[in-house]
Image: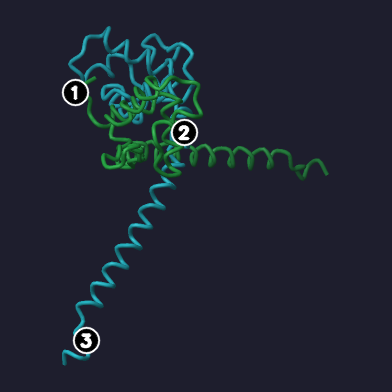
Chain colours: A green, B cyan
């Protein structure tokens, strides 16, 4: 776990609903450990452990100056994870486009088949 | 680990460079376990373990019919992870836009300051 590449550390940190909720909270601005702990029925040591994982992955930073040491969201790892995701976005967009084309062709063929032929009239 | 929500299972599966490389290979089309193992200096049991994690997260499926049981990329979990990432994409786009505006304002102010004032002429 110590020699993780940054992307692995980011995904490992995101693989927890509490940590994801903490990041979501931090999009609204910096928050202290107590503020971050509040919505969860968790002990402070557990919250601290989650924050440590987020901090080690570079997803949050703690202000050294203020006594309450508020946590701030750091977006760089998310930008990197998003860039990794982008290649798959292209992949599934292409696949959806292809499906869409196939569906339209099928529906057009079905509409053609449903038309009364001249011989029926 | 057994009661993971889908998003947690997806991010946990992505938190490994070998598994990410396997997914990248599968964007080119289905592949057998042997084909997936080839680029890695890993034993087949290790490769099978990685594939099991990917399969449990729903990121790949194995064809039951063919004897070689090729693996296929399943995009649904990636679409979900991408949707989760989208909220942060908005967040960092907004932040970049704000930074860009601040930078432009700073540069404009600097350019103004660098202009010789009328008194200097």
Residue plotted at (39% across, 20% down): A46
Q: Nearer the viewer, residue B109 or A108?
A: B109
Mark 1 vs mark 3: same chain?
Answer: no
Chain letter, disc 3 residue: B
Which of pointers 1 and 3 indicates the residue nearer the eye? 3
| Location of residue B64 in the rendering, given as x and y in whole percent from the top left corner | 45, 11
Q: Is residue A88 left or right of residue B107?
A: right
Q: Nearer the viewer, residue B104 or A93?
A: B104
Q: Quadrant of the C terminus of chain A?
A: top right
Circle 1: element type: loop
Residue wearing tag 2: B79
Badge 1 density bin: few <14, some 14–19, many ≥20, Cα 10 Å: few
Residue wearing tag 1: A3
Mark 2 and mark 3: Cα distance apart in space: 57 Å
The label number, if any, that marks residue B105 in the structure image: none
* Residue B17 picture quarter: top left
Which of pointers 2 and 3 indicates the residue nearer the eye? 3
Residue plotted at (38% across, 28% down): A14
Badge 2 density bin: few <14, some 14–19, many ≥20, Cα 10 Å: some
Which of pointers 2 and 1 indicates the residue nearer the eye? 1
Circle 3: element type: loop
Chain letter, disc 1 residue: A
Above or below, B82 against B20 in this view is: below
Q: Quadrant of the N terminus of chain A?
A: top left
| Location of residue B121 in the rendering, given as x and y in whole percent from the top left corner | 16, 92
* Residue B73 picture quarter: top left
Above or below, A97 against B53 in this view is: below
Badge 3 density bin: few <14, some 14–19, many ≥20, Cα 10 Å: few
Mark 2 and mark 1: Cα distance apart in space: 29 Å
Residue wearing tag 3: B117
Chain letter, disc 2 residue: B
């Amino acid at each position: 776990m110590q020699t993780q590449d940054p992307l692995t550390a980011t995904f490992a940190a995101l693989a927890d609903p509490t940590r994801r909720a903490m990041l979501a909270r931090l999009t609204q601005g910096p928050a202290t450990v107590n503020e971050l702990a509040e919505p969860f029925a968790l002990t402070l040591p557990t919250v601290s452990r989650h924050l440590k994982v987020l901090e080690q992955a570079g997803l949050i930073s703690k202000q050294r100056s203020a006594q309450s040491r508020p946590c701030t969201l750091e977006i760089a790892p998310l930008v990197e994870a998003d860039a990794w995701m982008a290649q798959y976005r292209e992949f599934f967009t292409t696949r959806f486009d292809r499906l869409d084309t196939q569906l339209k062709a099928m529906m057009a063929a079905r509409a053609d088949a449903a038309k009364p032929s001249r011989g029926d009239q």
